[in-house]
Image: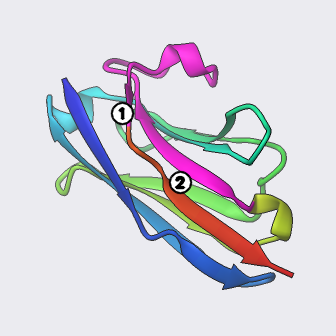
Amino acid sequence: QVQLVESGGGLVQAGGSLRLSCAASGRTFSNNAMAWFRQAPGKEREFVAAVTRSGGPTVIADSVKGRFTISRDNAKSTVYLQMNSLKPEDTAVYYCAATGTYYRGSSIGAYDYWGQGTQVTVSS
């Protein structure tokens, strides 16, 4: 089992930045590929970014490429999502997710463990 707790969400003006954190406990953190997803009101949950177990290769959704960066610190069992140049359409609940194993893609079904989510609201 992996327990995930997100933090860092909040209200920000368009063009601003936020850094989300996700602290993991339970199974060895470095054994898990990690990802961020988001879900806006009335919409399906969508993939945002993922990072492999080593923290090397990352995968970024086209909708946030060039603005968002994912990283991890295995010593701190934490994954981060740096969000810059935020837009109102980035408003959503952001979820941290873990695969339980190696990176298996960007689909929701590839991730076995989920956090409770943190709200990000971007005002225009």
Q: Residue at x 35, y 38 (%)?
A: 54
Percent x, y for residue 3?
A: 23, 37
Of all residues, the one furthest to the front in this rendering is 42
Task: Classify 8 as above or below 80.
Answer: below
Which of the 4 image quadrants contains residue 50?
Answer: top right
- Of the image marks 2 and 1, the number of the one nearer the N terminus: 1
Q: Amino acid at mark 2?
A: Ile
Give the residue displayed 43% in from the left and 35% down from the top. 97
The numbered mark at residue 53 is 1
Measured Cα–Cα span from mark 2 to mark 1: 12 Å
**x then y, percent, for residue 96:** 45, 43
Residue 99 placement, left or right of 15:
left
Describe the element under mark 1 as helix, strand or loop. loop
Q: Residue at x 67, y 61 (%)?
A: 68
Question: Mark on residue 62?
Answer: none
Say which amino acid is labelled 1: Arg
**Is 57 in front, or is 116?**
116
Residue 22, by quadrant, is: bottom left
Please give the range of residues in magenta: 91-114
The residue indicated by pointer 2 is 70
Of 103 and 3, nearer the camera is 3
The residue at 73%/61% (across/down) is 91
x, y percentage for residue 122? 74, 74
